[in-house]
Amino acid sequence: MTSEPHILPILLAGGSGTRLWPLSREQYPKQFLSLIDDRSLLQNTALRAAQLRRVLPPLVITGEAHRFIVAEQMRQAGIEGGRIVLEPEGRNSAPAAAVAAHFALREYGPETLVFLMAADHVIDDPVAFGQAVEAGAKLAANGRIVTFGIVPDRPETGFGYIRAGAPLGDQGYEVARFVEKPDLATAQTFLAEGGYCWNSGMFLFRAGLFVEEMSRYEPEMARLAGEALEQAHTDLDFVRLAREPFCACRNDSIDYAVMEKTALAAVVRMEAGWDDVGSWTFLSRLPASDERGNRARGDVLLEDADNNLVMASSRLVAAVGIRDHIIVETGDAVLVTTHATAQNVKKIVAQLKMRNRYEAVHHPRVYRPWGWYETIALADRFQVKRILVNPGQKLSLQMHHHRAEHWVVVKGTAEVTCGEKVFLLSEDQSTYIPLGHRHRLANPGAIPLELIEVQSGAYLGEDDIVRFEDVYGRQG
């Protein structure tokens, strides 16, 4: 008897999540945020996949800017043995799916089931999720390219739809057609008729079969994706795809490139409390925190307020006499919108980018492979930062042309390199790093190192760094 094939989870961790600004930023998008519980959406996706039967360690596909965030979050979640593939630039889901299929084919064999899923989705019922995946795995093992259709509970205009065709056994159907995001009237018709599901963007297929189908319908993309993986090089724990062939892939989704063309498409219906957390309206459906339907997180005071979502990250937020509003505060921005207009937050992000505003790209807390920093105060010729260095980690050996720095240790032990000197600082001790001096900060201890850094000088930008040595392979 032939053994059942293994499942290789592919976690797509790219994307910017602009409709969840100001919490989600280009350098720290929504998949890395803890929106539902104490874990990030990426961590929950990885842990959910780890509970499947016959599952292999996951493969995460992400971008250069997010590589260390992914690695740290996977470590914190206890996910071991996985690999992280770095795209030189985002090219949508079809090239990523092709790379994943080539990877599975090379590492595990053609019968391996590749389970492609976005890292920023929510699943409330992991048992129902697992049952749907098992049903999909049977179809995929028998030569189908499976997508998962979410049984709709409302006339949603933010998702694409799938029309189910003839039955294919337990929970499975042929795909009659894919439908673009409808208007409200059409979505209401779909809901009334039945037979339509939301397109979840999750796919399950045999590695060898998918490569064959992509080679049939998108031969150039299939070839280039294979070359990008074949010519990839390993950097620390990361697999860097070759830039030239990968960037030559057409920017396209797996739906357009393969699913709408293949005769092997199947859909499995899933009822597992799925959502793609596409905008702030999703969080407004979470359980209310008071009897008037408000949902408050952080330091929030409400008076004569109904059906609001209010999130405070760094200070007190008070609201009086408001209805159906969404207020989100971070250390550097405040968003005020309504439930009805929340989808348009992405237009604010577009304005910020057009004006080259810092707030479009960077999160108030900036994550680095050694830890993180956040700016406490910024003015002409000085900046104050709070810095955390994880145990055993170190910053690069570096120097600055335009600024000097004072470091004050508030927790833990710091190992400081300044010029030719190397010395330790404990809590309440400080040191001065003159302009132009080579220096390095490291945490030799077993607890996180926290310090306050005061920068002074004519230019305080992050690009004023000359790196001489870096354990993380960064240059600058």
Image (cartoon, rainbow, N blue to C red):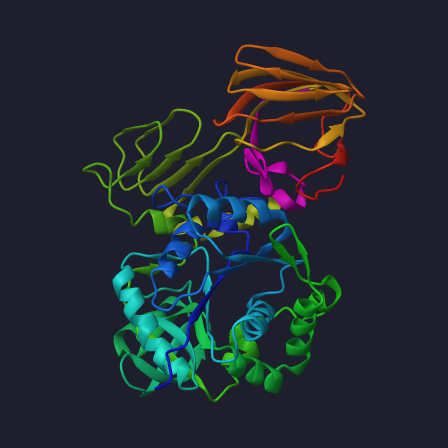
447 is higher (above) or lower (below) than 136:
above
Q: Quadrant of residue 140?
A: bottom left
Q: Is residue 289 left or right of residue 232?
A: left
- Where is the C terminus found, in terms of image quarters? top right
Residue that sits furthest to the left in the current view: 291
Q: Is residue 10 left or right of residue 320?
A: right
Residue 454 in sight here:
yes
Q: Is residue 372 magenta?
A: yes
Q: Residue at x 67, y 62 (%)?
A: 241
How far across and down, in percent of the image, does residue 163 sit? 37, 80
What is the total number of numbered labels drawn onto the structure image?
A: 0
244 or 446, which is in the foreground?
Answer: 446
Q: Is residue 29 left or right of residue 53?
A: right
- Where is the N terminus found, in terms of image quarters? bottom left
How far across and down, in percent of the image, does residue 404 sit? 74, 18
Q: Residue at x 72, y 67 (%)?
A: 231
Magenta span of residues: 352-379
178 is higher (above) or lower (below) than 85:
below
411 or 146, which is in the foreground?
Answer: 411
416 is higher (above) or lower (below) than 392:
above
355 or 210, which is in the foreground?
Answer: 210
Q: Is residue 427 left or right of residue 154?
A: right
How far across and down, in percent of the image, does residue 177 sit? 43, 83
Residue that sits furthest to the front in the current view: 1
Q: Quadrant of residue 297?
A: top left
